[in-house]
Image (tube, rainbow, N blue to C red):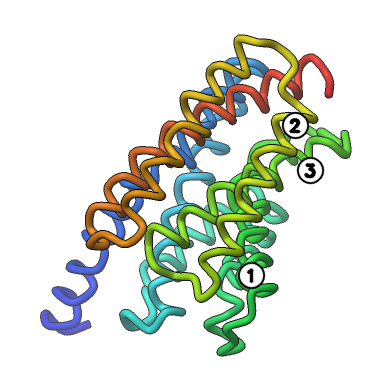
Amino acid sequence: MSITNLNYYTIFAKKHLIHYLVNIPGTLIAVFFYNEFGFLGYEHIASVILLHFSIIALDDYIDKKQAFPWYVIPMLGIAAYFFPLVTGLGLLGLLLINIRTITKSKSFFQERIEGLGMLPIGVFPFILPLGITDIHAFISPIFVIFVIDSFHKIAHRETNHKKLMWITGIISLILFTIIYVTTWFDFLVLGLVAYLPLVGFWILQNKPKKYSFIYYQIWQGAIILTLCAKYVQLLQTGF
């Protein structure tokens, strides 16, 4: 590999590291699982980090923002060695979150389906190694994913159906609240972390993208960690 190519990949590796750190709440939820179910081993946390980092790099490749990031091959190899099913499903999730790019479609249905790709990327790496089979363990995250994905697309200007994203995002949040929030304390926390910030999205949706992007990233971290704590609690106590 030439010096030029090495510098090229180094630049993108740094970019992906920053991107990964911005989205690190998706990996930090491991803390909640380890706290409730016990540490799953260094192999597990290493595999999750390598998988999540690789998916960020490959996502940019699919979006044609860079050449193929060859340095993720050994990362995925290590992750697959320890957790082959989780790694394989995570890569299928990568294809799902890029379904519009792959099919060159602008349909709302595919916009919604894309969000489901976060299930094998962000949820399966934690619940599959625990052998959890409760159907609600797979259904409840879908509501959360639809909420987060809706406002991700709105904040990043990645949707052609903004009104429908608002509607489906709010409906998903309400359904999650009705089905899974059972105490006034949880409802208060959800109101502060999930419902009240929607006002900010409404105000910023037509402002310059950088403002809504920063606002979303802060909100994303808060809501992922808050709802994950609730999700893990439900896994432990029963749905």
Above or below residue 104? Residue 59 is above
Report the residue marked by disc 2.
130
Location of residue 184 in the rendering, given as x and y in whole percent from the top left corner: 65, 10
- The residue that label 3 is drawn on is 138
SS class of the residue under badge 2? loop
> In the image, residue 143 lies at what x, y percent?
69, 44
Mark 1 nearby-residue class (10 Å; few <14, some 14–19, many ≥20): many
Lower position in the chain sequence, tag 3 or tag 2 = 2
Find out whether the residues at labels 3 and 2 contact each other: C-beta distance under 8 Å. no
Q: Determine if residue 49 is in view.
A: yes
Q: Nearer the viewer, residue 111 or 133?
A: 111
Find residue 63 and report its image quarter: bottom left
Which amino acid, mark 2? Leu
Q: Amino acid at mark 3?
A: Phe
Q: Is residue 139 left or right of residue 21?
A: right
Q: Is residue 107 left or right of residue 53?
A: right
* Pointer 1 or 3: first along the chain: 1
Q: Residue at x 41, y 40 (%)?
A: 199
